[in-house]
Amino acid sequence: MAQVNFTPNLRRHLSVPPAEVPGASVREALDAVFERNPQLRSYVVDDQGRLRKHVVVFIDGEMVADREGLSDVIEASSELFVMQALSGG
Amino acid sequence: MKKGERIQVASRKGLFTLSRSAGGGWAITNSAFLGDPVTIVLDDPRDRTLYAALNLGHFGIKLRRSEDGGKTWEETSHPSFPQEPGDGLDATPSGSSVHQIWALEAGGADEEGRLWAGTIPGGLFVSDDRGANWRLVESLWNRPERSNWFGGGYDDAGIHSICVDRRDSSNVAVGVSCGGVWITEDGGQSWECRTKGMFAAYMPPERREDPSIQDPHRVAQCPANPDVLWVQHHNGVFKSSDRARQWQEISDVEPSVFGFAVAVHPADPDTAWLVPAVKDECRIPVDGKVVVARTRDGGKSFEVLRKGLPQENAYDLVYRHALDVDGSGDRLVMGSTTGSLWVSEDAGETWATVSNHLPPIYQLRFSP
């Protein structure tokens, strides 16, 4: 089971506790989280399921490579962080 | 609360509610979503539900709903484009995603629960259950002319105006920047782009009158006579008295025919207000003076109204959704991209400053 953690900035809008989920790819892991928390989906991915432009996922410290298909392979021991880029003023 | 005594203001950093006191002064009496961009607010005249469209930037667009006048909010579903599969070569999804809700309007009095939403990119969406579910109006989205649309101020074309005919809810006018004025007379099953009389100086001569590239900055409809539409267009002001079949250019607007906002009197289709700016490549008030242009004769002549508005070194721009008139036609409110907000209680003759310190104002309107 991979662990998925979320930026604390999401807590302003909804509850996002760390999740232990099955999955062989970033897509599968995130889909498993969204199944538990459907409202979270549109905060992380766009209408087509692509990672939002200013959201990034790190897999064991490495930035996700496939931002559209989210096909990056993960291990059962992987730790994912869903973070936001800093922008605006 | 009487009609016209409350104003909802959507801004770059939150939603603000203004209320009128017994003495006639206006003050901010509620706020929500502080720090977050609110692109559109709707106070549904049918059941007084408040809807606020947010654009959270990193986390996308959201739609929140309040049934207690803005004290508490719940997240509801929001317009989104259907998922389109990849091309089969890889798992990469193609297709559009909503960047911004740019228009949100209630359906007719006879259409319980119906909401219309316009987005960037230029999708028109409809909900028949108060926002719980949305569907793309594919009859418009799939029109081949849509390939001619392009962004005006944003990367993609967008729908910013949705006018529902009070006499017949199946008549709806939609304004697209840049994509023309689209009319349905069958509740959205079929559409016609009607821009005859409009012109686009930003296009090559042979495409100057092309309907699907016109840039109506804002479309406003007279509630008492919905056949009358006013448009503040990128290249001037236009009026139609026959439900957009023919547009007349209104050229004598002082101090300029350029601007974004237009408001029409609720009972008198010949009375309208505009907020002119210099021109398209210089979007500031003429001579640094904020003024409102008013016609009471259908656009034949205009008065320039300025009492109470800043007349020196003022660079406020009133964006397309930031001018509104109440149901009496006497009260007006306008807000600027530099956070000023003014109210008039005498049809624009004189204005009172409510604030000069709000965030940039995207949209505002009187509560019904």
Image (cartoon, rainbow, N blue to C red):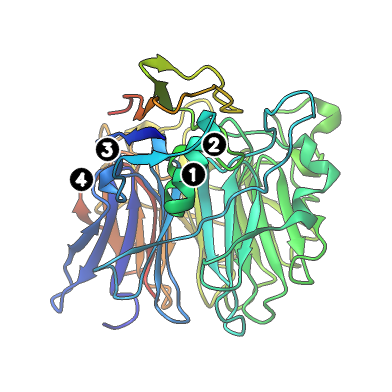
Q: Position of residue B188 (x, y in %)?
A: 75, 65
Q: Amino acid at mark 4?
A: Asn
For the residues labelled 1 and 2, the Cα–Cα distance comes to 6 Å
Up the image or down, A52 lies above or below B189; here it is: above
The residue carrying pointer 3 sits among few (fewer than 14), some (14 to 19) or many (20 or more) residues within 10 Å by Cα, namely few
Q: Secondary structure at mark 4?
A: loop
Q: Are marks 3 and 1 in contact (CB under 8 Å)?
A: no
* C-alpha separation, residue under disc 2 versus residue under disc 3: 23 Å
Label 1 sits on residue: A32
| Residue named by callout 4 | B356
Q: Residue at x 47, y 33 (%)?
A: B278
| Secondary element type, mark 3 | helix
Q: Chain of mark 3?
A: A
Discs 3 and 1 lie in a common subunit: yes
Observer-side mark, 2 or 3, equals: 2
Q: Callout 3, which amino acid?
A: Asn
User: Disc 2 on helix, strand or loop?
Assistant: helix
